[in-house]
Image (cartoon, grey):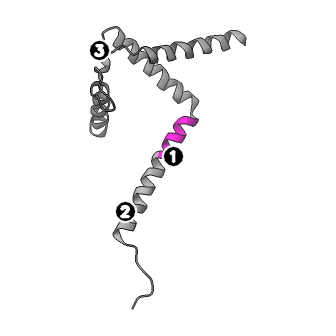
């Protein structure tokens, strides 16, 4: 009889799940550590908000995996996953707008103080 016990399939899946979650966390930590990328995300968010407020559309496109990402983003903007609400294109996102304005004022004040 073999003294070495082989890992069970459930144990192997558990290991793979753990590895995937750890990788996802590492990606998010890298994003948080990149101030320039965070600023780009903020600027893109402000541009999307301005477009929606002006009655314009946001169009996502992709090919292959990018298409799946664009389809997912479109669903996030138009569906109601967490709570009942109108699609973003029809909804005033006042709180987000206020956050962007506050952030811009803070940047302006910092620039004036330099």
Q: Is residue 57 visible?
A: no
Q: Position of residue 15 (x, y in %)?
A: 43, 62
Q: Position of residue 76 (x, y in %)?
A: 31, 29
Label 3 or label 2, whichever lies nearer to me, is 3
Q: Position of residue 81 (x, y in %)?
A: 30, 32
SS for tag 2?
Answer: helix
- The answer to which of 82 and 78 lies nearer the viewer is 82
Q: Above or below — where is 22 with respect to 80?
A: below
**In percent of the image, x 36 and y 13: which residue is there?**
92
Q: Which residue is mark 2?
A: 13
Side of 113 where 58 appears, left or right: left
Magenta stretch prevailing secondary structure: helix
Q: Earlier in the sequence, mark 3 or mark 1?
A: 1
Instruction: Pick the quarter of the image with the N terminus.
Output: bottom left
Instruction: Pick the quarter of the image with the C terminus.
Output: top right
- The answer to which of 81 and 58 lies nearer the viewer is 81
Q: Are marks 3 and 1 in contact (CB under 8 Å)?
A: no
Q: Which residue is mark 1?
A: 26
Side of 94 where 72 appears, left or right: left
Q: In the image, which residues are magenta?
A: 25-33
């Amino acid at each position: 009889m073999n003294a070495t016990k082989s890992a069970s399939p459930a144990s192997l899946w558990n290991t793979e799940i753990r590895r995937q979650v750890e990788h996802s966390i590492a990606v998010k930590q890298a994003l948080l550590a990149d101030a320039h990328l965070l600023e780009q995300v903020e600027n893109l968010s402000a541009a999307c908000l301005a477009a929606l407020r002006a009655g314009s559309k946001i169009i996502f496109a992709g090919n292959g995996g990018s298409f799946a990402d664009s389809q997912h983003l479109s669903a996030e903007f138009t569906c109601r996953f967490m709570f009942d609400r109108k699609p973003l294109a029809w909804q005033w996102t006042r709180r987000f707008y206020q956050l962007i304005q506050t952030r811009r004022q803070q940047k302006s004040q910092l620039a004036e103080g330099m």
